[in-house]
Structures are given as structure tokens and as C-alpha cells.
Image: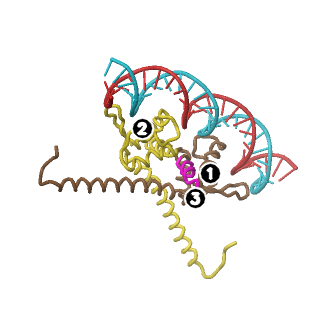
Chain colours: A yellow, B brown, C cyan, D red
Amino acid sequence: MLNQQTDLDQMFHALADPARRAMVERLTKGPAPVMELARPLPMSLPAAMQHLGVLEAAGLVRSEKVGRVRTCAIESQALRRIEQWITARRAEWEERLDRLDEYLKTIDSEGDGNDSGA
Amino acid sequence: MLNQQTDLDQMFHALADPARRAMVERLTKGPAPVMELARPLPMSLPAAMQHLGVLEAAGLVRSEKVGRVRTCAIESQALRRIEQWITARRAEWEERLDRLDEYLKTIDSEGDGNDSGA
DNA sequence: CAGATACTAAACCACTTGCTTAAGTGATTT
DNA sequence: AAATCACTTAAGCAAGTGGTTTAGTATCTG
């Protein structure tokens, strides 16, 4: 529970790369071996493996090796964590706008038609 | 519409740093001058300015200079863009689980009451 | 068992990040 | 006008990133 900060760091960082987002997008359609994740990417297999490592370290993907094939799958809870952070910010933001709106209405009905602007 | 890829890269990257997320969190409470965003951070003012630059480049924050004070505010549409990407992935993922569930039910009712479970 | 397959590990290198300090600019206060 | 304030720019540097190639390790296949 302590280092949620670092968790978010890693998750956002992991998603800040098109190759890694492509992997995540592929994995939302179902599990896949490393080979299949790497094939469409314009880079060598070791490079793709490093990206996969970043996704796993961030907790966005989990994988298991059976025989010589490592099968990867998405960890949906991690995505939810990011979603929550963003939703919280938006909620705060929208609540603020609501309060501002209330305040403006208060001012509007406070005095008579006195124009104190400018 | 073209470089949405790059947009997402920049937005996720911008949020992958605790100093920058702190700035965003502060700004969801309302606009603030650079000074106020920089003060709580454990770094020099120029360093904080660079973080702010990353947020602006990503379109998450907009700012305007009046006199010698630059006032910053959040750009809520950008947050919504990220939220949409994540929500889309989760929707895809959950839809897949639903389909899988349907499929399993199909198999289950295919034969008679044969218990094939563990 | 020879050879192909699917990763995995290691060494390396160009480039970018994330700070720093020092100096500069234009507004505002005294 | 002089001093202060709130940035802004620039130069520089240690550390990290994102790729490469090369070589190695277990599987499978014939």
C-alpha cells in the first residue's frame, strides 16, 4: 500500500510508449506468446522483450513459461488503478467547477443590479 | 486526428512523474502561478519549469502570462483523452471475458449433466 | 542426436532526461 | 532610479533509456 506513487510512475511510464501500448492492445484481445507480441513491432526480439519487462514490472502484464513458450496476459486490475487516478482528478475538477458555478450564482443575486465589475 | 499516437505518448509520459502529477493534482483545485506549483517540489525553479513545459507540450496544462506572473490551469479535455484509451481497453477486455463466459456456458449445456470439473 | 525454435542474458552505444548553477529579462515595489 | 520579484534562458553533466548485436539455454521436431 505504501508506494502507490511508484506504482503509478511505472504504470504511466509503461503506457507512454507505442510499442508497449500495442502489446497491451493485443493482450486485451486475449493471451499471447512473446513471439506474437514482438512480430508486428519494428525492432529486434530482445528489444521487444525489454518492453515486455517494463510492462511486467509495472504490473500491467503477467506471464508464465510453459515449455519454451512464454504466454503473456493482461493484468486488468492495474489498468483500473490508473483509471481511478484519472477519474479522481476529473471528479475533483468538475466538483470545483460546480462550486464556482454556485458561487457565481450567489454573487449574481447578492446586491441589486449594482455593476461592480471592471 | 493524425498523431493521436504521439499525443498519448506525451500525455502518459507527462503523468509518469510524481512532480508532474503533483502539479496536476494542485491544478485540479484551481489555477495557480508557477511559483505555487514549484514551491512544494524538492528541486530548483528552473527544474520545475521544465516539468511544467512537459505538461504543456502534452496539452495537459495551459498557461498565460500577465505582468510577471504566469498563471497555469488544467486542460481537462486531455485527461479525458487518456481516460478514454484506458476505458476502451477495459471494455474490450471485459467484453472478451463475457464472450468466454458465454462459450463456457455453451459447452456446459452441450452434453447432459456430465460433471467434467476437477 | 542434429537442427530449428523461442526465448534469455550480456555487452555496448547513441541519445535523451532531469537535474544543476549562473546569468538575463521585464514587471512591480520602495 | 534602485531593488526585488517572478520567471526565463543557457550551458553543462550524471544517469537512464532504447535500441543494437552476439552468444547461450532449454525445448521441440525429424
Q: What element carries label 1?
A: helix
Q: Marks 1 and 3: CB-CB under 8 Å?
A: no
Q: Quadrant of the N terminus of chain A?
A: top left
The residue that mark 2 highlights is A35
Crowding near pointer 3: few (<14 within 10 Å), some, many (20+)?
few
The label nearer to you, 1 versus 3, is 3
Identity of the amino acid at label 1? Ala
Quadrant in which residue A60 is drawn: top left
The residue that mark 3 highlights is B1
Earlier sequence position, callout 1 versus callout 3: 3
Q: Position of residue C21 (x, y in %)?
A: 70, 34
- CA separation, marks 3 and 2? 31 Å
Residue at image coords 71%, 59%: B66
Residue at image coords 64%, 48%: B53
Q: Where is residue B88 in the image (x, y as percent from the top left)?
A: 43, 56
Q: Is mark 2 on a helix, strand or loop?
A: helix
Q: Main secondary structure of the magenta part?
A: helix
Identity of the amino acid at label 3? Met
Residue at image coords 62%, 52%: B56
Q: Marks 1 and 2: CB-CB under 8 Å?
A: no
Q: Position of residue D30 (x, y in %)?
A: 33, 29
Instruction: Name above or below for residue C10 compared with residue B12.
Output: above
Q: In this view, does B69 lie to the left or right of A23?
A: right
Depth check: give the residue in front, B86 or B36: B86
- Specify whether disc 1 shares its chain with disc 3: yes
Q: Is residue D5 left or right of residue A83?
A: right
Q: Quadrant of the C terminus of chain A?
A: bottom right
Label 2: chain letter: A
Range shown magenta: B1-12
- CA separation, marks 1 and 2? 35 Å
The residue that mark 1 highlights is B57
